[in-house]
Amino acid sequence: MSIFSKKTVEKKADNKADAKVTRPKVLSGVVTSTKMKDTIVVKVDRFVKAPKYERFVKISKKYKAHDAGNTKKEGDRVEIVEVAPISKDKHFKVL
């Protein structure tokens, strides 16, 4: 019989099955720019509690998202989902 028992081999197989499945991020925001071809800029706001002052602060971040055919206009509220990198800065696409 080999060094590894049958139970050890089974445990290794079980560990692969227990791998975490991550879901892509879904963010919602407002379109701020549509000047690029097939790309929009989406401003996403979120509220975070400031530990020092114990009050909520609004934090904004802009994401570039793929919009095939430039269907969205500035001011539209959109949802974007995380995908594999499309370009250097684009990691999201419009739902």
Image (cartoon, grey):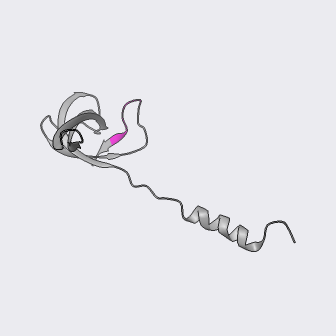
- Residue 21 visible from this viewpoint: yes
Q: Main secondary structure of the magenta part?
A: loop
- The residue positioned 32% from the left and 43% from the top of the image is 93
Q: Nearer the viewer, residue 66 or 41?
A: 41
Q: Find the residue positioned furthest to the right.
A: 1
| The one of 89 and 21 positioned closer to us in this rendering | 21
Where is residue 32? Give x, y as percent: 17, 32
Residue situated in front as seen by the camera: 20 or 63: 20
Choose top left, top right, bottom left or bottom right for residue 10.
Answer: bottom right
Instruction: Specify the quadrant that holds the N terminus.
Output: bottom right
Coordinates of residue 40 in the picture (x, y in percent): 25, 34
- Residue 19 rendering spot, x and y as whole percentages: 53, 60
The number of discs equals 0
Work out which residue is located at the far top of the displayed protein and give it.
35
Q: Is 95 situated left or right of 32 in this image? A: right
Q: Nearer the viewer, residue 59 or 54?
A: 54
Q: Is residue 42 visible?
A: no
Tell me which residue sits at (54%, 64%) in the image.
18
What's the magenta region? 88-92
Q: Going by the picture, which residue comes out furthest to the front? A: 52
Vertical position of residue 73 compared to residue 80: above or below: above
81 inside magenta stretch:
no
